[in-house]
Image (tube, rainbow, N blue to C red):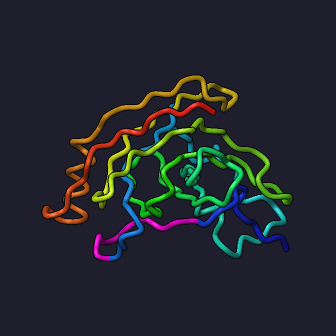
Amino acid sequence: MLLQACSMGGQRLKEADSLANVNNNEIIVVGTIELTPKLAHEEQLLNPPGVLDLFGYAKMNRNRAMIQFNSQPEASNYKYLITPELGKTFFFTIPRDMNYMVEGSVVMELSTRGVSGKIQLPTWFKLDIKPDDRAVYIGKLKYERDDFNSIIGMELLDDYKNAAKQFKKKFGRKHILRKSLIKKISS
């Protein structure tokens, strides 16, 4: 029996369900991660023979990205991880001081030794978080891949109107979602 663990270090964060549950040291980040062409259902090999998936690792990674945040623009320190569903607007609560996106990937294959294949997503972005922000829209990151799962293009799109509509539906009209598109940082 082999127990699967996340291939990236850090604490996995849950999606926000209410602004009432967000404390002063946290903020809700709203955005979308899109992969084109989209993943076919059978394309991810997440249930290898001989592996007992007690923690639902395959389900947690099916059609999802893993994006890590850090308080510094480096991937070496302890980080926080979100797992947004590809192509859907996400609403994750992160610590307010974790304003750098430092790593990104999509798990493509698991083996008895753990993650044996993944698509690396270029990140290295900084979030502009103001002291009075409760929620920020960071944009839609659209990654284009080739037949070998290498990222050959990336585009940041502004889909604020759609995200704001979904935000109001989920959290109510009295809360403000500030548009604050992510900015590229040098590595």
Residue 98: percent from left, percent from top: 51, 56
- Farthest residue, direction left: 173
* Quadrant where the image shows the C terminus: top right
Q: Is residue 70 left or right of residue 1?
A: left
Q: Residue at x 51, y 37 (%)?
A: 35
Place of residue 12 in the rendered image (x, y in percent of width and height, measured from the top left): 58, 65
* Closer-to-camera residue (49/130): 130
Q: Which residues are magenta?
A: 12-20
Q: Main secondary structure of the magenta part?
A: loop
Do we see residue 104 in this rendering? no
Reply above or below: 61 against 161: below
The answer to whether 6 appears left or right of 134 in the picture is right
Task: Decide if residue 163 is on the left or right side of residue 150.
Answer: left
| Residue 152 is one of the magenta-drawn residues | no
Q: Quadrant of the N terminus?
A: bottom right
Closer-to-camera residue (90/128): 128
The residue lying at 25 percent from left, 53 percent from top is 177
x then y, percent, for residue 183: 44, 35
> As drawn, is 15 to the left or to the right of 21?
right
